[in-house]
Structure formats: C-alpha cells, structure tokens
Amino acid sequence: MPQKMQRIGGGMDNELQARPAHDVDIGNRADEEMKALGIDRALISAVVDTFYARVLKHPELGPVFDARLSGRWSEHTLKMKSFWSAVAFRDGTYGGNLFRPI
Ligand code: HEM
C-alpha cells in the first residue's frame, strides 16, 4: 500500500517537473517555425503599427476603433504586439482578456 502511494506521488512530481520543460519545447519549436517563415518581433511590431495606421485612415473602420481607443492608441498597439507575439512564439506573455465584451 505505501508503495502504491509512493508511485502515485512520484508520478505527480514528474508531471509537475515535466511541465516547464514541455513549455520550453513548445516555445523553441514555435521560434524555429517563425524563423523559417521570417517572422520576428520587429516584423510583428511593424505589421501591427501598419495595420492600425490603415484602420485609423479607413473611413468606416477608423471611427469605430477610435471611438473606443481615442487617447489609448499606444497602449492598445503595445497590447496587440504582445498578443500577436504570444500567438506566434507561444511564449505565454499575453495576459490580456481577448474575449472581454467591449
Ligand atoms: C472588426 C473587428 C474588430 C474590432 C472592431 C475590434 C475592436 C477592438 C477594440 C476597440 C479593442 C479595445 C478594447 C478596449 O481596450 O477598450 C479591441 C481589443 C482587442 N482585440 Fe479587437 N477588434 C476586432 C477584431 C479583432 C481580431 C480579429 C482579433 C484577433 C484575432 C482581435 C484581438 C483583440 C485583442 C487581443 C484585444 C485586446 C483585449 C484586451 O486584452 O484588452 N480583435 N478590439
């Protein structure tokens, strides 16, 4: 009986220890995939800046976004860079709330 408990306990420990290593694997694989595609954080930053600059100039979309984000654009673009970097590099850095109703 004690042997069984020990085995279960050992398994849980291993699982907890394995998780950070697994996360590192996922991150490394994502880094390689993005490198192969030529995507780095500087590119994500440029794409986000370009995208929202064009959104703002758009006659229909611009006012929709600006009504909500006026005065907070730099905060928003930083957040979106963090979001897309977390998606691309799977680094878990985005701590926002994607599905919060606006
Ligand atoms: C017509 C389509 C969209 C509109 C009008 C829109 C509008 C907005 C606005 C106004 C905000 C800022 C909310 C605030 O801080 O007050 C926001 C946040 C955000 N949006 Fe969108 N969005 C659209 C599509 C998308 C898409 C396609 C994605 C990603 C796939 C996305 C991802 C996000 C994220 C990650 C945030 C930040 C949420 C947070 O953590 O606060 N949005 N969106």
Image (spheres, helix red, strand yellow):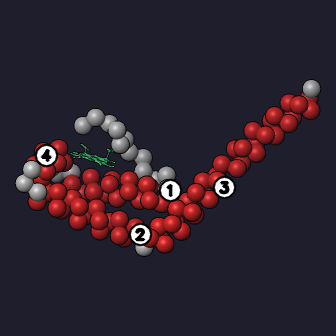
Three-letter residue code for mark 2: Ile
- Pointers 3 and 1 in contact (C-beta within 8 Å): no
> Would residue 84 be found to the left or right of residue 2 on screen?
left
**Res 47 seen here:** yes
Residue marked by disc 1 = 91
Please tell me the numbered disc located at residue 17. none
Circle 2 packing at 10 Å, graded few (<14), some (14-19), many (20+), is: some
Question: Relative to 67, does residue 49 appear above or below in the rendering?
Answer: below
Q: Tell which circle, 3 or 1, labels the residue nearer the N-terminal end.
A: 3
Q: Position of residue 11 (x, y in %)?
A: 79, 40
- Pointers 2 and 4 in contact (C-beta within 8 Å): no
Q: Residue at x 27, y 57 (%)?
A: 77
Residue marked by disc 3 = 21
Residue extending farthest to the left is 59
- Pointers 1 and 4 in contact (C-beta within 8 Å): no
Separation of marks 2 and 4 at Cα, in angstroms: 29 Å
Separation of marks 1 and 4 at Cα, in angstroms: 31 Å
> Would residue 59 be found to the left or right of residue 2 on screen?
left
Please tell me the numbered disc located at residue 64. 4
Residue marked by disc 2 = 39
Q: Tell which circle, 2 or 1, labels the residue nearer the N-terminal end.
A: 2
